Image: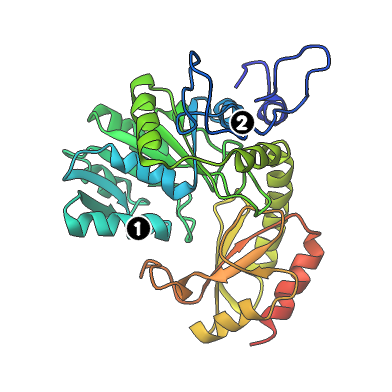
Amino acid sequence: MSKDRNIETSAITAGRPEVSPDASLNPGVELTSTFHSGGPIGYGRYGNQTWNALEAAISELEGGQTLAFSSGMAAISAVFSILPVGAPVVASNQGYSGVMTLLNSFHESGRLEVRFVDVVNTDEVIGAMKGAALIWLESPTNPCLDIADLPALISAAKKLGIGVGVDNTFATPLVQNPLAMGADIVMHSVTKFLSGHSDVLMGSLSTNDPALFKRLHESRSFNGSIPGPFEAWLALRGIRTFPLRFNKAQENAKYLVEKLSGHAKVSRVRYPGFGAVISFEVAGTAEETQKVCDSSHLIAHATSLGGVESLWERRRRWPMESATVPEQLIRLSVGCEHVDDIWSDIESALSAI
């Protein structure tokens, strides 16, 4: 990010074409698989001008050179793909279910040796680092919103020569900047807050290490986990309003946390004090919790987060969700609707049990 610009400005200005008379204000959608020889791209699997514009924008937000991927899971898989067979990896015992499923399968097959830890317990995490190749962190975790001490964990890992990857999807660069803390890789599910309109599947990786960037670029190229140009263009358009959307949703979330905390049918509210995701537990059974989600009229009952619309779900409805997640937990992605309307819908849904 330009040192003289705030992130809200960079979200609007980054990734624009060069200024010249009658030049377009926005980058175009580069729909081609083939390029004339002699340039830096060479072939459509190696690069694309529309990807480049999106990557430039995310690079300014996160402060590191960026690669766009076809999904968040594709980006994460690229990180694990460059580790040697049997490499020890430290990861949360409660995190995004897709990553948990992938790491469990790697551990069972011997592809990686995965050490699952409670990321809130800093001493436990540091104790598991000995001999590890990588520590993979979420903070806040998905869906329980636990907070890891990122500065302490990153510092400890770097002293041991261990690579650090951080999923920054929930916090976003508006809240924290892991690369500035010393992390090697920052990952985003661009699908979520950065894109923000529930119409794109995409991921990204950012790093300040040129050699690591080259390895990740090769992984993307030869595994074929590349984004589509039109999806990249949509994601970049979404980034233009990312700070406005995120700040409004976060404002709504803080209000809803107060209301939920005083509701008789809510036994616990999980919220780290920032962000636009709230997890809360219903004072009832799993079936009653499911009924709450089924009873909303404004809030969409769906799996995802980070869009302009509010949505929620009972996370344990998914068989692959971590057993540490309570059966009565609802993850609520707060949108940009009027907060009184969101709360009215929550109250109505809770009254169904």
State the residue in front, 261 or 16. 16
In the image, residue 182 sits, relative to residue 94, either above or below, namely above
**Marks 1, 2: nearer the viewer:** 2
State the residue in front, 214 or 209. 214
Q: Tell me, yes or no, if residue 321 can be seen here.
A: yes
Q: What residue is rendered at 49% in x and 82% in y?
A: 286
Task: Say which quadrant the N terminus sits in.
Answer: top right
- Counting from the top left corner in percent of width and height, residue 188 is at 50, 42
Label 1: which residue? Answer: 100
Residue 50: which numbered mark, if any?
2
Which amino acid, mark 2?
A: Thr
- Counting from the top left corner in percent of width and height, residue 305 is at 59, 57
Which amino acid, mark 1?
A: Met
Left of 103 or right of it: where is 207? right
Q: What residue is rendered at 70% in x and 30% in y?
A: 28
Q: What residue is rendered at 38% in x and 54% in y?
A: 99
Within-10-Å neighbours for mark 1: few <14, some 14–19, many 20+: some
Left of 328 or right of it: where is 134? left
State the residue in front, 315 or 220. 220
Q: Earlier in the sequence, mark 1 or mark 2?
A: 2
Left of 322 or right of it: where is 276? right
